Amino acid sequence: MRLSLFAAILAGIACGALPSRAAPVSQDAFLLRGTGDLVLLCGAEPSDPLYTAAQNFCHGFAVGTYRLAAQAEDATRSKSKLFCLPPTPPNRSAAVSAFVQWAAARDDILALPPADGLLRFMADRFPCK
């Protein structure tokens, strides 16, 4: 169940748009103390000196979380899934952008563990019917 939520968050990250004025990335954000740090890294501006590192970290974390969630769901053979991707899922960059946009509008999730925030996004963006 948790795995599906993560995958949904990851997919959502690929579907959105980055904010126009992201805060500068700090080294501390890479500690991922909460979803807010993940949003900061994923929403880094190309002009930020840590942009490449932030994007690589963001995409790697998102893919890892999604795969772990998917494997956990498959292992439990649960009929109840946290999220269901469409037949043609969004690309990773679009999903990351969607996640940043979604999370920026939800202050209540920014303190959650990053994987939880990502999975909530996936569940919200890609609910199962």
Image: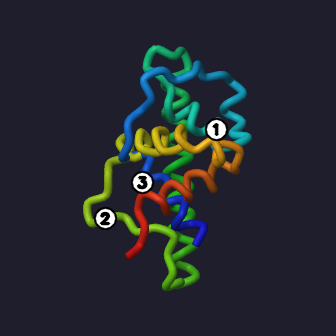
Q: Which mark is residue 11?
A: 3
Callout 2 touching callout 1 (CB < 8 Å): no
Q: Residues within 10 Å of mark 3 (few under 14, many from 20)?
A: many
**Picture disc at residue 118:** none
What residue is shown at x 38% (from left), y 36% (from top)? 17
Query: At which x and y percent is residue 100?
Result: 49, 39
Instruction: State the SS at label 1.
Output: helix
Q: How much space separates mark 3 and mark 2, taking CA atoms? A: 10 Å
Q: Label 2: few (<14), some or many (≥20) within 10 Å?
A: few
Identify the mark nearer the N-term, 3 or 2.
3
Disc on the earlier residue, 1 or 3: 3
Is 57 left or right of 16, judged from the image as shown? Answer: right
**Circles 3 and 2 in contact, beta carbons < 8 Å:** no
Query: Sequence-wise, which precedes: disc 2 or disc 1?
Result: 1
**SS class of the residue under badge 3?**
helix
Alpha carbon distance from label 2 to label 1: 27 Å
Q: Nearer the viewer, residue 128 or 68?
A: 128
Circle 2 residue: 86
